[in-house]
Amino acid sequence: MVTDHISKAPAISPLAVRDRTGSVSIGEVIAVLNGEINGLHIRQAFSTEVAEEITANFTHNPGLKERRDGVPGQYVGASHYRTSAAAYYPESESVRPFVEALFGDFVDPVHGLFDALKRELNKHSIELRLARSARGQANICRAFCWSGAGSFALEPHDDVAQVLNAGNDSEISAVAKNTVVALNFYLRMPEEGGSLRIWSHKPTVVDRKSQGVETTGYPYSLGYLEAIPKHDFQLKAGDIALIDGGFIHAVTAQSTNGRRRLLLNNFLGFARPDLVLWWT
Ligand SMILES: O=C(O)CCC(=O)C(=O)O
Ligand SMILES: [Fe+2]
């Protein structure tokens, strides 16, 4: 039978990756915001002692919850994923004490990076702030422990679909036309696996429709990704990774005995040439 259905292979987008050891350079963070670097892995960017303290504060956190939105995992904090702005900001306000409890009273890398980036952008008359609405303000981060049990601990997805679908009343939707940066701080890593895998492909709205993930960007099938080159970031506790969340990415399967992978995560990006928003 002849069919007029043409399946197009996904377009390859070149992936500029940098991998090094040492402290965070704000110039490199800005290069990711500007789309000049698409994946940046900084090894030993913060101390494993701090990582252990935050991990203990996660484990004992009274705000620890199971995800109930189809993505397996535990978390502390609020997510705008599949949530309207009307619900996201009040939820962020109500869980803020639990996010603050992750840090106790010590100096942590998330506030450190936020403050350093804010100072640097200010020099160029660019404001950095948490996203907000009349109903509240985003939190500085959330904590995730993924528990997917198949080939991936977190299935292949992109982070832009959720921003495109954040709603007209959400100021973060303006970031979707620029780079949506995902910023990850790794607190604890399993014995094996749990790498951050990124594919050389930035899906368009048409690609998402063809995969049935138009509003969520989650999950893409392995068949769809088969022919696309990929890069694995092999992470350790104390590492930071920044990626352009428009590229499809996933977390590879992790060993299930022993330590469970834990990270702090947030998103940031230009909403206007003079405004960078930060949210979760
Ligand atoms: O756990 C990771 O390394 C990536 C997390 C992620 O992609 C997300 O939260 O959207
Ligand atoms: Fe993601």
Image (cartoon, rainbow, N blue to C red):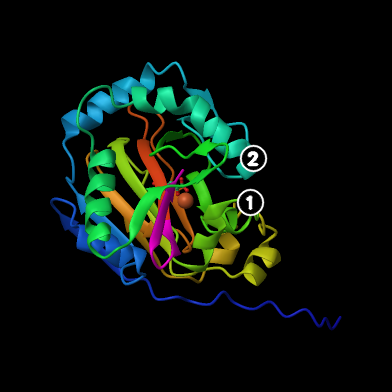
Q: Which is the main secondary structure of the residues drawn in magenta? A: strand
Does the magenta-highlighted stretch encompass residue 276? yes
Cβ atoms under marks 2 and 1 closer than 8 Å: yes
Kind of residue indicated by mark 1: Asp
Badge 2: how crowded within 10 Å, few (<14), some, or many (20+)? some
Please state which of residues 262 and 177 is positioned toward the viewer in this rendering. Answer: 177
Is 250 situated left or right of 52 in this image?
A: right
- Locate residue 87, reporting x and y percent: 63, 36
Q: Is residue 70 above or below residue 173?
A: above
User: What segment is highlighted magenta in the picture?
Assistant: 269-280
Q: Is residue 161 above or below residue 195?
A: below
- Locate residue 220, reporting x and y percent: 59, 57
Disc 1: which residue: 169
Disc 2: which residue: 86
Q: Residue at x 42, y 23 (%)?
A: 98
Give the quadrant of residue 193.
Answer: top left
Q: Is residue 139 above or below residue 65?
A: below
For label 2, the SS is: helix
Q: Which mark is residue 154?
A: none
